[in-house]
Image (spheres, rainbow, N blue to C red):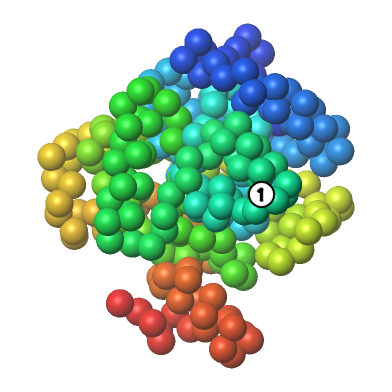
Amino acid sequence: MIQSCGAPPGWAPAWDDVDVFYWLVKATLGTFLRIVFRPRSQGVKNVPRRGPVILAGNHLSFSDHFFGPLPLPRKVIFLGKAEYFTGHGVKGLISKAFMAGVGVIPIDRGGGEASERALTTGLRVLAKGRVLGIYPEGTRSPDGRLYRGKTGVARLAIESGAPVVPCAMINTFEFQRPGTLWPNTKVKPEARFGKPLDFSRYKGQGADRQLLRTVTDEIMQAIAGLSGQEYVDIDARKAKAQLAEGGGQADQNRTRE
C-alpha cells in the first residue's frame, strides 16, 4: 500500500530514539518536504519498532538522506563520509552541525583500518538498540543502476545479529541527479521498505568471506526486487571511473572480479 510519508497512526518516537535536535529538524524540515514534494512510502511497518535494525538501501541521490528516514518514527543513524564534517568557514560549520544533529556519524572511507573503525562504530550503534542506516554500494549510483554491495553490511548483520530491512529509494535519481543542486519538483520521491532479513543463524561466522559475499548479494537482490533497478555486478566506484573515461554505461564484464 502506498501512502504519503508520515508515521503510521498511533506510532510515536520511542524513548531510546529521543534526540531533541533530530526530532526538531524532522518536524520542521520534514513538514516542508512533505508539503512541497509530496513524497510517498510503502512498507513502513516492516521496520521493527524496537531493538537494533540495519536499514540497507540503494543510493541514488543526496536527497536519499532525507526521504529515506522521513516516514519512519525511529531515528536513523547513518555512517557518512568524513568530508561532511571537515569543511571550512560558515558553510563548513553549518554542514557539520546539521549532519551531527540529524544522526550522521563521520567515517573515513579509505579502506583497511578505516573500514574496521567504521564497522566497530556501526556495531556500537546497533548494540545500543538503534537503527543504523547504510548504503551497501558505498557511494551514489552514477547512472541510476544498482551496483555490487560491499560486504561490510553482511559483517554488521552477522556480528550484531540485527535484522536487515532492505530499503529502495524510488525516483530520487531523477529528482536530484548527481552534480545538480536544485531538485526536479515534477518528480515524487518514494521510499519502499521490505520485510526484515534474518541472518542470526550465521552468528560467529563473520570471517567467512564466501558467506559474507552470499549474504551481501542476498541483501542487494532484495533491494533490487523493491526498486526494480538493473543490477550490475561491479563496484560503483569503478563504474564511475569507467563513465568518466568513456562517457557511456559501465561495462560489467570489463571489471568483473
Q: How many marks?
A: 1
Q: Between residues 128 and 199, which one lies in front from this camera angle?
A: 128
Q: Is residue 199 left or right of residue 93?
A: left
In the foreground, 114 or 76: 114
| Residue at screen point 57% across, 36% down | 100
Q: Nearer the viewer, residue 91 or 73?
A: 91
* Residue count near mark 1 (Cα–Cα under 10 Å), binned few <14, some 14–19, many ≥20: some
The answer to whether one can see residue 150 in this image is: yes
Q: Which one is in front, 105 or 180?
A: 105
Quarter of the image with the N terminus in it? top right
63 above or below 7? below
**Residue at point 50%, 76% (across, down):** 239
- Residue 218 horizontal side relative to residue 100, left or right: left
Q: Residue 251's x, y, as percent?
A: 48, 83
Quarter of the C terminus within the rendering: bottom left
Residue 114, image quadrant: bottom left
Asked whether residue 154 appears in the rendered view, the answer is no
- SS category of the residue bearing label 1: helix
Q: Which residue occupies 47% across, 19% down?
A: 49
User: Residue 90 at x, y = what percent?
Assistant: 73, 47
Residue that numbered label 1 is attached to: 92
Q: Eyeballing the image, is 49 above or below 250? A: above
> Going by the picture, which residue comes out furthest to the bottom?
246
Expressed as whole percent of the image width and height from the top left, the position of residue 122 reads 36, 39
Residue at point 29%, 41% (across, down): 120
